[in-house]
């Protein structure tokens, strides 16, 4: 969780179990966390809900995005997500240019509130 260079406010970096995301933990050349290509997204913390970890699961806490579906709008719910803290050192080292395009930042399968963009 933390601030980013691509948009104001708090953002949660999320690593998906499946390769249905938007990025690899970097946006606009700034790396916030590491994962495989198409395994990461950014979302507002208010869109995440905590789900209890089932028996036999690993000890990581899992979060899932509310009302999120697989890319393409199939209506099938996406798998659990793990929230990864954003690296503050990387956040402060990049220069904000202000001309990043929002067109490649939104997650077409999510429900957006008040102009929020999922990345």
Image (cartoon, grey):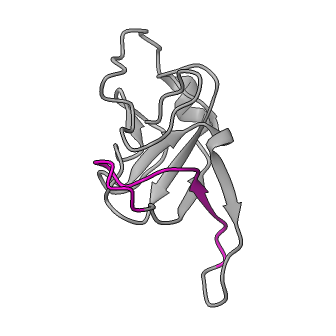
Quadrant of res 46? top right
Q: Nearer the viewer, residue 40 or 85?
A: 40
| Residue 107 percent location from the top left of the image | 39, 38
Magenta stretch, main secondary structure class: loop
Which residue is at a point 45% across and 61% down the rendered structure image? 77
Q: Residue furthest front?
A: 75
Q: Nearer the viewer, residue 73 or 4?
A: 73
In magenta, the rendered stretch is 59-76
| Residue 41 percent location from the top left of the image | 44, 45
Quadrant occupied by the C terminus: top left
Q: Residue furthest top?
A: 98
Quick check: 117 left or right of 76? right
| Residue 61 percent location from the top left of the image | 67, 67
How many marks the image carries: the answer is: 0
Queried whether the magenta region covers residue 9, the answer comes back as: no
| Residue 1 percent location from the top left of the image | 64, 41
Quick check: 67 left or right of 51? left
Queried whether the magenta region covers residue 60, the answer comes back as: yes
Which residue is at a point 39% across and 32% down the rendered structure image? 106
Which residue is at a point 47% across and 22% down the rendered structure image? 6
Quick check: 53 left or right of 87? right
Q: Is residue 74 above or below residue 17?
A: above
């Amino acid at each position: 969780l933390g601030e980013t260079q691509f948009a104001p406010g708090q953002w949660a970096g999320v690593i998906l179990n499946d390769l249905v995301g938007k990025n690899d933990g970097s946006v606009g050349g700034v790396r916030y966390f590491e994962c495989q290509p198409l395994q990461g997204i950014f979302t507002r913390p208010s869109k995440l809900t905590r789900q209890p970890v089932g028996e036999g699961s690993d000890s990581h806490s899992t979060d899932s995005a509310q009302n999120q579906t697989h890319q393409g709008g199939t209506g099938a719910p996406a798998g659990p997500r793990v929230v990864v803290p954003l690296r503050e050192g990387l956040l402060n080292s990049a220069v904000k240019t202000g001309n990043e395009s929002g067109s490649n930042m939104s997650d077409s399968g999510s429900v957006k509130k008040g102009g929020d963009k999922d990345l």
